[in-house]
Image: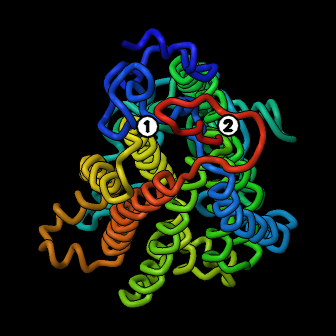
Amino acid sequence: MTSPQQPLQPHGHDHPHAHDSGHGHGHGNGAGGGGGGGHGHSHSHGPAAPVSRHLRKVIAAILIPFAAAVVVGLAVLWPGGTPAHERTGVGFDRQTEQGEVVAVERVDCKDVNAAQVPPTGDTSTPEGREAVNAQQGQCEKATVEVTSGPDKGRRFVEIVQPDAPRQLHQGQGVVVAYAPDAPHDLQYSVTDVNRKLPLALLAGIFAVAVVVVGRMRGVMALIALAVSFLVLTYFILPAILEGSNPLVVAVVGASAIMLIALYMCHGLSARTSVAVLGTLVSLLLIGLLGSLFIGWASLSGNTDDNTGLIHGLYPQIDMSGLLLAGVIIGSLGVLDDVTVTQTSAVWELHQADPGMGARGLYRAGIRIGRDHIASVVNTLVLAYAGAALPLLLLFSIARSSMGTVANSELVAEEIVRTLIGSIGLVASVPVTTVLAALVVSADRPASGGGKPAAVRGGRRRRAK
C-alpha cells in the first residue's frame, strides 16, 4: 500500500510517477508497506540530474581547465578587426549601395543590343550566336534610382534580357554595384535584389515558433544562437583573415560556442557537462581525421572563384586549414544534438531503473543511439548533396563516370567533409553513452553530517 509512504517523499516530488507505486524493481529492502514499496532512493526530475559532490568535483576538475584554456585562447587569438584592403571589384569584393526600380519600359531587344553583334556578322562562335539571339524578343529597360551612399538620388538604366534569370519590376528594391573607375554612365549596375524583408519575416516566424514550443528553453536557444554568430563574426572570421592558424582558431571558437550554447540551453549540470565532454572528444577525432585525410588527398581548399578571391586578397591564409576549420565548425551543431540526446537518454534510463549498472545503461543507451546514428548520417549526407546539386548536375551533363566525378577536387572535398563529419557523429554516440553511463552509475550517496534525508527502503536521499 502506498498511502502510508507518501508523507516520506521529499518536497518537489508530488507529481505521479510510474515507479513511485507500491511495487519495486527488485532491489528494495523489503516488500511490505514499511520499506520495500519504494526504490530505496529519491531523485529529481528537473533539468539537472542528482550526482554526488565528489562526482561534481571530478567533472569540474576536467572541464574547468578546458574552459580556462578556451578563455586564454580567445584572449591570445582575439583579432583587432578585419584587415583593410583595396576593393578589387570582383565577386563579393565590390562596393555596393541600395537602389529602387522606379520605372520599367518594354523595348525591342534589337534596339538596345545592336552593338553586341560582331561587325562581320559572324555567328559561328558561341559569342556571335549569343549576340544575335540577344536581339530577339522584348527586353526590359529599367530605370533604377540609388537610395543610399554619396550618390543618393542618382538614376541609371539597366537593360534586362527576356531570358535573364532575374527580372525587375517597378518599386522593387535592388542592390547596385558601384565601380568608381568606370565611365560615368557605367559606374552603377544592378547586382542583386533586396531580400531583407522576406528574410527578416522568416527569421521572425522562426523565433516565434521556437519560443512558443520551447518556452524558456527556446528563448535561451535563440540567445545561444546569437552568441554563436557573434563568436563567428567577431572572432573566428577576423582571426583567420589576420593570418592565425585556421585550425587553432576553429578549435578555440568552436569550443567557446559549445560551452556557451550547451550550458545556456541545458543548464549548469552534470548531465550537460557529460554532453560537453562527449562533444569535445568527437571534435578532437574530427580534427585528427581531417588533418590526416585532407593532407593525404591533397585537397588545397582553393576550388572556386570565392576561395580563389580569398587567396588572392589574403595569400597568408592556409586554404587547406580553412577547409578543415569549416569541417569542424560545420560538425559542431549536429554533434551537440547527438551528445545531448544520448546523455539525456542515459539519465532517464537510470531514473527509470536506478539498479541498472553502467554496462546495462550503456547497452540500453546504445540501442537508442543506433536509431539516432542512422537518421543523423542520412541527414548530413543529403544536406551536403543538396548543397552540391548544381555541381553534380554539371557532371551528369558532361556524362562523367562516378570515379571521375569523385576524384575531382570539388567533389572530393565534399566527400571528405561529409565522411569525416559522419565518422565524428557516429563516434560521438558510443563515447557519450559510455561517459554518461559511467558518470551516472558512479553516483554515491552524500556522506557527512547535516539534516538526514528522507529514507525509503533504508537508503539515504542522494545529494544533488
**Alpha carbon of mark 2 to alpha carbon of mark 1: how far?**
70 Å
Q: x, y (%) of residue 265?
A: 62, 38
Q: x, y (%) of residue 33?
A: 40, 19
Decide which of 191, 104 is in the foreground and name it: 191
Q: Is residue 407 above or below residue 367?
A: below
Decide which of 82, 371 is in the foreground and name it: 371
Total marks shown come to 2
Q: x, y (%) of residue 254?
A: 62, 61
- Residue at 46% from the left image edge and 48% from the top image edge: 343
Q: Quadrant of the rendered structure where residue 449 is? A: top right
- The residue singled out by tag 1 in the image is 351
Decide which of 71, 378 is in the foreground and name it: 71
Label 1 CA crowd tier, 10 Å (few <14, some 14–19, many 20+): some
Q: Earlier in the sequence, mark 2 or mark 1?
A: 2
SS of the residue at dot 1? helix
From the image, which quarter does the N terminus lie in? Answer: top left
Residue 244 placement, left or right of 213:
right
Foreground tag (2 vs 1): 1
Q: By what rule are the colours in the image chosen?
A: rainbow
